[in-house]
Amino acid sequence: MIGAKMMWGNSKGPAMIRYVVAGAMLGVLLSATPSFAVTSKEKMATCKFGADDQKLTGAARSKFMKKCMLNKDEPRGAPMAPPPPPAMPPPQH
C-alpha cells in the first residue's frame, strides 16, 4: 500500500503514463508505414542504390535501371517447391 500511495501520490504519475503510452503508439505507427520513393528523383536514387549494391556495370546496369524506373508491380513467379523429405535409413536388424 505504501508503494502505491507513493506512486500515485503526486498528480504527475497518470499524466506521465499517458505520454509514455502515446509515444509508444506513435513509434509503432510510424514504423509500420511503408516508405516508398514518391518522386522520380527519389526513385532514381533507390534504383542507383540497388544497381550499386549489386555492382552492376554497362548493359546490365542500364537494363536494371530501366526496369527499376518502370515501377511495375510484377509477380515474382511460381513459388519454390518444398524440399523432399529426408531419406529414411534402412532398418537395422
Image (cartoon, rainbow, N blue to C red):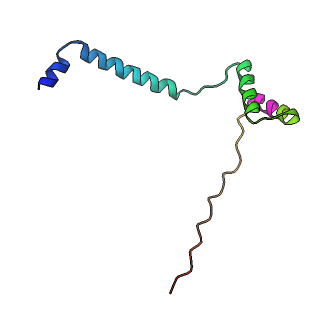
Q: Is residue 42 left or right of residue 82?
A: right
Quarter holding the N terminus is top left
Q: Residue at x 40, y 20 (%)?
A: 23
Residue sitting farthest toward the right: 59
Residue sitting farthest toward the bottom: 93
Q: Is residue 67 left or right of residue 14?
A: right
Main SS category, magenta section: helix
Check the image and report above or below for 75 versus 17: below
Q: Residue at x 72, y 28 (%)?
A: 49
Residue 86: where, in percent of width, then height? 58, 68
**In magenta segment, residue 65:** yes
Q: Is residue 80 left or right of residue 89?
A: right
Residue 24's image quarter?
top left
Residue 85: where, in percent of width, then height? 59, 66
Residue sitting farthest toward the top: 11
Residue 37's image quarter?
top right
Q: Residue at x 85, y 31 (%)?
A: 62
Q: Residue at x 76, y 31 (%)?
A: 52
Check the image and report above or below for 91 versus 25: below
The span shown in magenta is 64-71
Report the number of numbered marks: 0
**In magenta segment, residue 13:** no
Q: Please name whichever residue, 29 or 74, is drawn nearer the observer in this view of the structure.
A: 29
Q: Is residue 74 left or right of residue 60?
A: left
Residue 56's image quarter?
top right
